[in-house]
Image (cartoon, grey):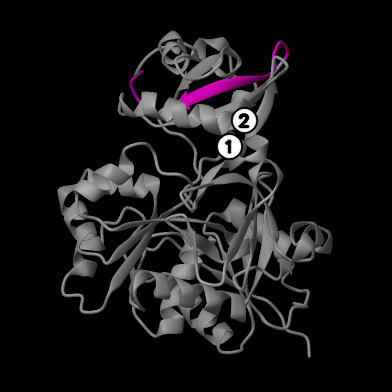
């Protein structure tokens, strides 16, 4: 008998709009039809539905969900997660955190981090409380809690919450705050520790049921190996089953029995340090430039000026690829020459940005990661007046 996918519309975690997903996911975890959480944005939802092809049956017998991920291309792929993988991830997470607890939902449920928040609580039989992406519901949610209580956020949410005394105090009452969506900006972990927060940094992706490495240490059962150039591969019970209707991509990603990621890393005192993606390395003027390394150095400069920053490579007729820095400062925190002089103390000349663009915000995906695909598209034709 063919099993059909159940698309479920989701909304922001603002007070129970995802109750329909919770009911459908609960049935799926109990052996029912797999679910596909849909984004609230109609354009994004249309692209996801076209990829999902819900009128076609699901071939994977143990599928519990298909979660959309855009990867680095901007085109969605459907990551098929099994009941066993979701359960293994939830069990390992609770074991690492100290036991099952209530979960506060602050991330969109159509992305794996928000989806797994709900799956963990449903599997453990604990409560889910929606607190909003702005965490406005956090103080009320933590009032009178009796069980361990956990929250999953991205760096932007944590940064803004720490600037609010009420939210900061509420965060300090939580048993753990999982921080994902990319490496935290310089100084953020120190500010969180000073405020009394227990931060757990996470690394993972949709294909691993979200975070599978906590504070640099793989979860129980998860195996991480580094190949040539620091290529990160992951094996273990939390891996996805396949990409929806894409056996070619599945075979390439799972070659060798593990997941071959596009990320680079190294071991630092026995803990995994993620250095960036392989496509972060571009050729500018005939020289390899590690954009992730430039961004780490530029973040220190930007943090001193109360700004965020992203570094990308943009096609350029002279350099092949030009290194471009983008800040989210409403007021210009410094000029291009100031940035280049600062970075020049630790980076070689080819790695120094050739443009500095100031804009009120840096575009991010719903999962909190910098939307580099969008930035590259916007800046490929931008003019020099953006420079300072």
> What's the magenta region?
317-332
Binning the other alpha carbons within 10 Å of mark 2 as few (below 14), some (14 to 19) or many (20 upward) gives: some
- Magenta span includes 185: no
Task: Name the image quarter holding the N terminus.
Answer: bottom right
In the image, 153 versus 351, the foreground residue is 351
Contact? badges 1 and 2 (CB < 8 Å): yes
- Secondary structure type for disc 1: helix
Position of residue 350 relative to residue 22, above or below, is above
Q: Secondary structure at mark 2?
A: helix
Residue located beneath label 1 in the image: 372
In the displayed structure, 184 sits above or below 22; it is: above
Q: Is residue 321 magenta?
A: yes
Residue found 49% across the figure and 38% down from its top: 363
| Residue at 17% from the left image edge and 70% from the top image edge | 143
Residue 284 in the image: above or below residue 187? above
The residue to which callout 2 is attached is: 376
Side (left or right) of 359 relative to 349 = left
């Amino acid at each position: 008998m063919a099993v059909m996918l159940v698309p479920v519309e989701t909304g922001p975690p603002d007070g129970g709009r995802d109750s329909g997903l919770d009911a459908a996911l609960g049935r799926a975890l109990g052996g029912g039809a797999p679910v596909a959480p849909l984004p609230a944005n109609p354009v994004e939802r249309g692209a996801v539905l076209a990829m999902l092809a819900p009128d076609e049956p699901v071939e994977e017998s143990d599928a519990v969900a298909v979660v959309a991920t855009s990867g680095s291309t901007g085109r969605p792929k459907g990551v098929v997660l099994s009941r066993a993988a979701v359960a293994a991830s939830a069990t390992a997470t609770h074991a690492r955190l100290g036991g099952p607890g209530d979960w506060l939902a602050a991330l969109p449920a159509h992305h794996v981090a928000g989806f797994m928040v709900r799956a963990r609580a449903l599997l453990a039989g604990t409560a889910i409380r929606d607190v909003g992406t702005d965490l406005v519901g956090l103080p009320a949610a933590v009032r009178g809690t009796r069980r361990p209580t956990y929250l999953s956020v991205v760096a932007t949410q944590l940064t803004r919450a720490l600037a609010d005394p009420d939210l900061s105090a509420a965060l300090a009452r939580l048993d753990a705050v999982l921080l994902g969506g990319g490496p935290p900006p310089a100084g953020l972990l120190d500010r969180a520790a000073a405020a009394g927060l227990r931060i757990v940094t996470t690394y993972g992706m949709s294909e691993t049921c979200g975070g599978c490495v906590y504070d640099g240490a793989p979860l129980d059962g998860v195996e991480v190996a580094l190949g040539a150039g620091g290529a990160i591969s992951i094996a273990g019970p939390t891996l996805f089953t396949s990409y929806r209707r894409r056996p070619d991509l599945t075979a390439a990603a799972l070659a060798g029995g593990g997941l071959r990621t596009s990320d680079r890393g190294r071991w630092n005192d026995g803990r995994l340090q993620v250095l960036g993606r392989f496509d972060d390395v571009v050729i500018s003027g005939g020289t390899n430039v590690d954009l992730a390394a430039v961004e780490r150095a530029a973040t220190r400069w930007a943090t001193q000026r109360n700004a965020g920053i992203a570094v990308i490579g943009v096609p350029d007729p002279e350099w092949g690829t030009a290194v471009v820095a983008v800040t989210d400062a409403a007021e210009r925190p410094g000029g291009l020459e100031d940035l280049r002089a600062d970075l020049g103390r630790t980076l070689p000349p080819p790695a120094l940005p050739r443009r500095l663009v100031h804009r009120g915000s840096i575009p991010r995906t719903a999962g909190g990661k910098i939307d580099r695909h969008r930035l590259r598209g916007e800046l490929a034709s931008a003019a020099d007046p953006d420079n300072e």
